Every structure is written in structure tokens, then in C-alpha cells.
Amino acid sequence: MTQNNNSNDTVSILTKKDFVSDQMVKWCPGCGDHSILASLENVLPKLGKKKEDIVVVSGIGCSSRFPYYVNTYGFHGIHGRALPIACGIKMANPNLSVWVTTGDGDSLAIGGNHFIHTIRRNFDVNLILFNNKIYGLTKGQYSPTTPLGQITKTSPYGTIDEPFNPGELVIGAKGTFFARVTDKNPKYMSDIMYRAAQHKGTSILEVLQNCVIFNNGAHNEITDKDKRDDNQLILEHGKPMLFGKNKEKGIRINGTKLQAVTLGENGITIDDILVHDEKEEDPSIHFMLARMHLPELPVAIGVIRDVDSHTYEDMLYDQIEERKVSSPYKCVDDLLNSGDTWEIK
Amino acid sequence: MSTKKEKVKDLDEVVVRFAGDSGDGMQLTGSLFSDIAALAGNDFITFPDYPSEIRAPHDTVSGVSGYQVHIGHKKVYTSGDLADVLVAMNPASLKANLKWVKKRGTIIIDTDTFVDKALEKAGYDENPLLNDTLDEYNVIKSPITTLTKQGLKNLGVAPKIAQKSRNMFALGIMYFLFNRDFKATDAFFEKKFKDKPDVIEANKKVIRLGFNYAESIGVMGTTYNIQAAKLIKGRYRNITGNLATSWGLLAAAERSGRKIFLGSYPITPASDILIELEKHRQFDARVFQAEDEIAGVCSAIGASFAGALAVTSTSGPGLSLKSEAIGLAVMTELPIVIIDVQRGGPSTGLPTKTEQSDLLQALFGRNGECPTIVIAASSSADSFYFAYKAAKLAMEHMTPVILLTDGYIANGSEVFKIPKMSELPEINTPIAIPNDENFAPYKRDEKKLSRQWAYPGMEGLRHRIGGLEKEDINGNVSMDPDNHQLMTEYRQEKVARVANYIPDQEIYGDDTGDLLVVGWGGTYGALYEAVKQMREKGKKVSLAHFNYINPLPKNTEEVFSGFKKIIVCELNLGQFVHYLGMRQPKFQYYTFQKIKGLPFMVSELIEKFNKTLEEK
């Protein structure tokens, strides 16, 4: 292990400016990516890590230009492959804080295999999923999250491709951390990014991000100022699941389903409302929360699931340390001369 | 050690082939026989030849598993053309292997298995033991199954174990025939079946039954002895190519001070490298069985970016899947070692058979101008040195290196002189100095053109790299036309200059002559043996066997210039000769190509070379 562990004096002097790179940001004006960049730049100084110990990794797509804009070590990979690159970095040096920026096409289509297997193994990496429900950089083809029936360049008669909800996939793949935010609230996004960084294991943060050019307004029903109070359920651990302008509405469990109810109507009291427990091992409620969708239910925002589990690299390093003690081979000479050998004199 | 007075004859060399149903334990039987040869100080090379199915249909020709070993009092170079002795455990194995036995060779047969149903499944219209099929061979017909079961009756061994011990009866016959003792084999049983005392007893008993049976029937007028080989002084072991490759990588990691990382996905015949390296956590080996071939190579690229000696291992179809990522490693100018244990292709092809048909894929199978170093190991044992060399070249020149081995040398084994780590060449990695104000990600070493290796965690060297074209020196993304030309030429020239750091091409034989035999990779043994035998008969034939393919050794043209004719031999349809035609276009090349999933036979090579010499 390297010796350059974080120290508090280093941390205190870092600011957002330390993480702004000298590269020109080339996203479209009004793109949701700008707010994600600003949020991450705000979070990185708070991680308690040296600048040298942070790595941003990406695949291909608009989201994947991200590493160039952050003044850390960065790796811009190939389409879909950010996660295995990130996992390789993490296995080589687990002291690093590793961030992956990716889109719905990059991580759920071409990189879908790596997405589920990284989550299953629970590598300690933080993934920011820019979900704009479209392929932006290749100019407007439908993605694995594009709603059924949407007309795009490659679906002139409407998509016939059943979409993924990323949260369902994460929880189905045994995810230990899943959160969702919108690109309209960078301050809140920073808070949740910090939570993702604090989580030991694979953190998936879905950002409902607007592509102004090819899918403008895809998340308007969720993010518009006049609709967001009714259409977003902001989750807080240990708090009842209330939403609406005056928190007059809530979520209860009715039979095997979640149901939106209004306090005071039909005898509903605050005691009927589900209390959010992001630490619950059993993913059933988290799964239902992740898949809540309009118009019947508000969309869950915030940390949906955050449970403790062993990480791949911790177990790997435990085995390495154990074998260093118990193995009869202390160096390669020992190995070469092990087993059946014979001497010619 | 035999009590009766058989004539004991000294042999210089012998080729033995064990064949049976897959599941009959032929690989184990064969390897025990070679282990004994090793302990007797013989030189040897082995060749396992097995079906891709775990348990192919019982008693069919496609389900036959074979293991050949060539044992010598002198140095041997191949696993042998034709067998002096064949052990055939059932009709299908006789059917499949008879063509690999020398005329007047010895065939040991389990007659119990030559029943109607098995004969029919093997495709025999009539019992070959009852007609003239085997007239030209010395056949030892033994009721091996019956004798094994009878012998174990008193031990109270389960019939299943008795059935499984038949192979040891056959091995016992071989031990008698070759004057071997049981000590090491007994020790093996005790270790392998530690928790199954009944199996240990059964095996020990059956191998002796076989031995005593051979002795008592007196069918062998002669038994054989192979004296210890006169090898260079030192410590030796038996090693397969895959094991040698794995250990060569561990050696390179230790010598360079880099931690080794392997990202790999199981694939025949390369999986043994993954399996071996997984065992060596004590050397800080971070070994990752990825979800697919692409994740295997990409995790290696990530680990390389983070400062590890990064490796991915695969076979042909897997190399295809890794192509795009290898391009990423070329663009980011990061060291990775890609091991391709070649097998029969295209597509899934012949997973368990050997071939050399990935050469052009290794050289050119990527988008863009995408050069990598390509080297090839030529034997099981020297896979150690070429794996070491691949790692050394990758890290010193900051580039991917593709190491080609093949199913024949990877699964085959031979005697390996154990090196001392301190004797291996140094590995000097161009690691950047923290806080070096003059650091730039794409600033190059003047001689090698390699860039520096600066990895996360190193202070003052933060930078971003990726698959987009890089601007010279500062490494920023650049779409500038002149810069692209410059960088493309740098990448090409960087690999070309590796020629200054590899040895000259050696010639076996004279520098001039009538015929230069040219080969590469795993065919070395057969080509060497063929040229040696022809030279012993006074033919003016030499061998230039290539391990360094891209770049070629600097003296290649000079080597080729000394001969009237050049013949390029390879296990494909002419990939190396095609490449030589590009790089050394002024020569005319004769070719010998074989694409049967099998290694060259020395006899077919000699025949071809003689014809080529005669051609006007």
C-alpha cells in the first residue's frame, strides 16, 4: 500500500478551484452536465483525499468528457468500459477515490454487463449515471431508458424497446447504494454525491439529466417548479415519506403495493405513512421505491438504499495479507524450486 | 528391478502414447509416466491431445483422450512423430490412434473392452483383434478390466473405484516394460487421495498387479532402459507452457518491483494461466476473473494506469473481443501484456487443438494504425523467458505486447532448467518523479520514444489520458491534422525502435546454404529436429526460428540473404510468410503449411525440405 493516506491539513486547504481543469468545457449551453460538474467540484474537496488520490474514469458519450474537466487523474476510456477500467484501478490501488461518469447508453446498453457485475461484486467506486434517456453524442438515437413509444431518430414510429429503470437494475444486481437526483438542484446533488462517496461499496447515483438538444424536457414532469413538489418524493432516512407542497401527501404500503395517500383523507394519519429505512438489508421496499413512477406515484429522489457489505477489493486484500503470512513461498525463487525438482550434477 | 532375466536394452529415446475414453484417466496416467522419466533424469516433451467435451460420448472416437510423451537419453525437441508404444484402453482409442503408431511398435490393449457394442461405436465392422489389422504390430492383449476387478475383490473396493483404476494396471505394465519403480508414484497417490485411503490402496495395488502381470506372462522378451540424459548441470523440473508463462510473469513482477495484475476470462487452452496466478496472492498478485474478455483487458488497462504490471490472458476468440481495448492501450501508451494461447479457428474452431492462425490478428487486428510488439514463445519451457520478456518490453517501452503461445506448447510440458531470479535481466521502468515540474504526459524518451509512467497517487503529476488522439507532449485531446500524423508516426516508430533492444536473429546451422527453414513460435522443436537430422545427412540446411515478430530482428535481411532457397513453415495458411512478404519483399519464399489442429511431424518436414531442395 502507498503511504499517501489523506491527512486533515491537506484536506482543509482544498477548494473547488483545485479541481477545475484548464480544459475548455465543450457541452452544449443549458446541458444538465454543467450542473453535475459543478456539484462534483464542490464535493471533491470534502472527501478527505489528496488531489492525487482521486481518479475520474469514463466511457464514451457526452458524460464521458467529464474527466478532462476535473483536475485529478483522469481516464477517458472506450464505449461501455469505464467500470472495468475503474475496477482495475481500484484493485491496483484501493487507496484511491474512484469516480465513474457515464450515461444511460454507455452504462446500460454497451456497458450493461459490466454495470451489473461491478454492482454485484461491490467494488468501492462511485458511479454517476447521467440519465437523459437518449444517445446525445451520436445525435439522438433511443437508449435503454427511452420511454416506450418515443419517437427518436432510430424509432421513427416510436420505440418498441421496453426500457430499463436503472434503480431496478441496481437493486436486482444486489446493489448496496442507489440514489437519484435531478440536475436542477446542484446543491442537493452535491450532498448526495458526498453520501455516495461515504458509502463503502459500489454507489450508483442516477442523475435525471436534461439533454437540451435531443431530448429536451424529458424530465419536466419531475423537475418543473410547479410540479416538482407533487411529483418528487424526497427521501430522508428515518423520516416518513411525505411529499406535496405542504407535505400533505405520503406513501403507504397497501397490500403488496405502494400507494400515494393524502393525510386526513379516509382516516389516513401520519402513522400510516412508511418511514424510510435506507439501511434495511431486505431490498423489497427499496425496489418498490426505485420503480415508483408518474402519474400514479411520485418519483423517489435521494438515497433509496445504502447498506453495508464487504467490498471486492477488501476481500482481495485480506486474502493477499493472509497468504503473505501463510504461504511457503516468500519469493519467486521459492516457487520455481517448489514441488518435484531434480539436480543434474 | 525385475526378478526374471528379461533382456534389458538401452534405448536413446522412446515415444509412448496413452489413449482411452475421456474419463479413463489417460492424462493422469501419461503425466505419472513422464514424472517418473523426470526423476530418472531423462529429457522429455509431452503432448496431451484431448476432446473439448468433458465426457464425450462413451466409447466413441470423438471421445478419445490421448497423451503422448517423448522420452530421451539425449535432448528431445518434440513430443515425437509416431509412438513406439500405444496403450489403448478401448476400441475407439485404438481406432483413433493406430495411425500414430510405428510399424512393429508395441500396442497394449484391454481386451475386455473389445465387445460388440464398443466395437460398433468405434466404427469397427469386425473385431480388429481377430483379423489382420494389427499384424504388423507387437500386440499385448490383456484382460485389464477383469484382472483389475479380480485383484481388488479382496480389498472390498467399490466396483466404481475398481473400474476407475484400470488405467493404473496399464501403467503398471509400462513400468515393467521400462524398468521403473513405484516410489514416486506411491507418494503421488498418497498426496492426491489424502482423504481417500481406499483409493490410495486400490491404486497402489493395481499398478503392482499390472507390473506383476507383465512380468509373469513373459510376453516381453525385452524390457527397456533409458539412461539419464546428459543435461547441463543444475536443478530441473517438469513444466507446461502455461505454467512457465505464469511464472515468467511473476518473475517479471518481482524483478521490476511492480505488483502484478491479471484480468482474464476462462477460455481453453489459456485458462491454466488464470488458474495458476490465482494461487499466488502471497506475491501481491491481484487476479481478477472478469465477467467477459473485454472486462478482462479493460481492468488490466485500469491497473496499468494505476501502476501495476498488467496482464490479460486469452485465446483467439478472446483476442478478437479485446481488440478495441488493445487500441486504447496503444493510444494511452500504457504497458500491458496480452497472452494469446492460440487454438484452431476461426470462431470457436478447435478449442483444444493447436494452431498458429492468430498471427495476423495479433499484428493487424485493430482499428486505425495500431502497432503493438508481437513476440512468440517457441517451447513450453521458454514460455517462461518470453513471458518475462513480454513484461519487460511492455514496461520499458510503454506499449502493449502480445505474446503468442499455442495449445501444443501451453498444454505440453518439458524439462525446464530452473533459473535463479538474480540471473534474469533487469527491468527498468520509466516511472516519473513526483512533483517533476518538467513532467508532461506525452513527453518522450529520446531513444525509445516511450512516455513516462505517472500513476494516481503520485503527487504533482495529475493528468488525463484516453482513447481520443493526444496532442504531442501535453496529452490534451487534439483533432489537429498535423498532430495526428505526428502522433501516429511516433506510435509506429516507438514499436519499430524496439528492434534496437532485441537480440539478432540466430541461425541454427551455417550462415549460408541451399535451404533456410524459417518458422516462428511453437513449431520450433519439430523444425529443429528436422533440420538437425538433415544436417546429419550432410544437407546444407539451416534454421532461422523467429521469436520476435514485430519488430523483426534487425539482421533478418542479412540472415535470409545467405541461402539459395527459403521455406517458411507454419500451422496456418501462410500468415508469417505473408508478413515477411511485406517486410522482406525481395526474397522468394517456399511455404509449408499445415492446418489440422496438430503440430508438425518431423518426417513430413524432412520430406518437404528434400523436395524443396530438389525443385528447380
Image (cartoon, coloured by chain):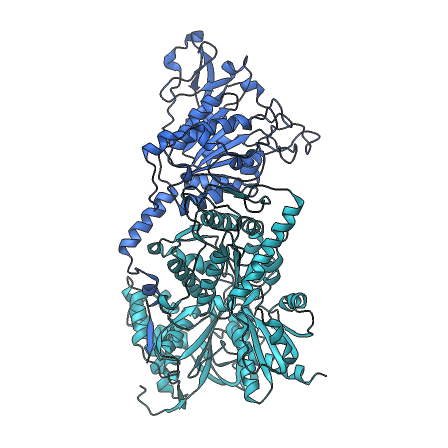
Among the 4 quarters of the image, the one containing residue B238: bottom left
Residue B406 seen in the current view: no
Among the 4 quarters of the image, the one containing residue B25: bottom left
Chain A: colour as depicted? blue
Residue B595, given in percent of the width and then of the height, sits at 61, 69
In the image, residue A6 sits, relative to residue A148, either above or below, namely below
Chain B: colour as depicted? cyan
Position of residue B256 in the picture relative to residue B51 (left or right): left
Residue A226, given in percent of the width and then of the height, sits at 55, 12
Residue B102, given in percent of the width and then of the height, sits at 53, 83
Which residue is depicted at the point 49% across and 27% down? Answer: A38
Q: Quadrant of the C terminus of chain A?
A: bottom left
Give whichever of A244, B362 is nearer the camera: B362
Position of residue B494 in the picture relative to residue B261 (left or right): right
Number of numbered callouts drawn: 0
Give whichever of B486, A86 is nearer the camera: B486
